[in-house]
Image (cartoon, rainbow, N blue to C red):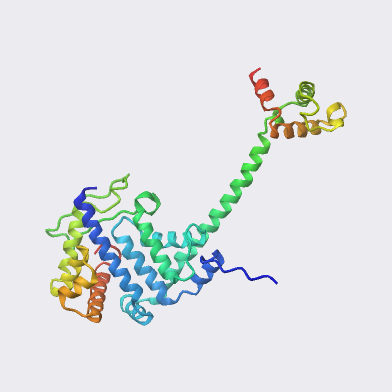
Amino acid sequence: MSEGNRKKLEALDRLAEELVQDILLASDEEILFEAAEDEPDLAQYLADSKSVYKLARKSVGRQAYETARLAVQHDKVAASTSSVLWLSAEKARKLLESVIKTNSADALPLKLAARKGGDLSDSDVQSLLEDLRELGVISSILDQDADE
Amino acid sequence: MTTPEPASDRLSVSEVEEAIDALTDADWVRLKKVSIIYARNRKLCPGDLLQEAFASVLDGSRKCPRDVAMVRVLGGIMRSLRSSAAKSEALRKELRLVPQHGGDGVEEFDHPDPSPDPEQALASDQECEMILAEVLALFSDDETAQIIVEGISDDMSANELRELTGLDEKEYATKRRLIRRRLDRSYPQGWKK
């Protein structure tokens, strides 16, 4: 924008400010009198103004719903795309055995039953691997696995 | 015994809703008028501007000071939105200056650009100049009003203008009201005739 245009626009903005101040300083009676003078249907004029507020409420409500929906969707996607859940039951069990073998007992927060592996159901294995992944114990193993 | 928590100096969202519900008919008229004025100098739709102001207090993105009337808060937000309108595509609207008297001998400008950049979203050089000239011409029968309009445009203060025109505070306020009313009637929907 040219300097000249900016100044002209600022001049119009200053005029706008004065007009707004005048509106805010006018009494309720004056404002309603003016509106009655200018608007053939004052009730409709007021209804139009208020409908804008209703639209805003709807739009904010819709936005809040959309945000919540996306958050739920995000959680579901995160759960379904867990690296561990992509593994087959057999591969998952092998991975758990491998993790147990290559890490000391102190390094793994696993109970004895878990350390034996064989007593666990497939879903227990998946769940344990997911916990270990969240703890950062098996991320590198999974990466290596993916590379293979 | 616990001391009650001091009330925040900002309204909560539910308090904002209560304050809006308590707006008077005159306040609703004020808000509509203010939205039209702030939308005039940019390519904005007054209704969208007002809706955006409402939405921003309802979703909490704009805070409402407890000690300021809601109509002033919303007016201030519309002012701020107008200033940042160039950043918001959603608020933009085509602005077309149409001939004042049926098109005879009045220059028309070529608008709109289908993909306006932020600067193009503001009135063009020619438009601004023509609008200012038209506004001044509206008061060709009232030299004092013309001086005030020109003075406001030139960033003169109310005190300076009162001194220049010899008006006291009340007379100045009356003249300013006359200016607004004439502009209201001449430009009920922005800078369109």
Residue B146: percent from left, percent from top: 16, 70
Residue A84: percent from left, percent from top: 71, 30
Q: How many marks?
A: 0
Front one among A42 and B91: B91
Residue at 18% in and 67% down = B151
Residue A31: percent from left, percent from top: 35, 78
Establish if A85 lies above or below A30. above
Establish if A23 lies above or below A147. below
Front one among B18 and B39: B18
Residue at 68% in and 38% down = A79
Judge left or right: residue A95 versus residue B68. Answer: right
Residue at 26% in and 76% down = B177
Q: Quadrant of residue B189?
A: bottom left
Judge left or right: residue A48 versus residue A78. Answer: left
For this orientation, the residue located farthest to the top is: A148
Quadrant occupied by the C terminus of chain A:
top right
For this orientation, the residue located farthest to the left is: B105
Residue at 43% in and 66% down = B73
Residue A63: percent from left, percent from top: 53, 54
Judge left or right: residue B68 versus residue B4. Answer: left
Establish if B139 lies above or below A115. below
Residue A117 visible in image: no
Residue B87 visible in image: yes
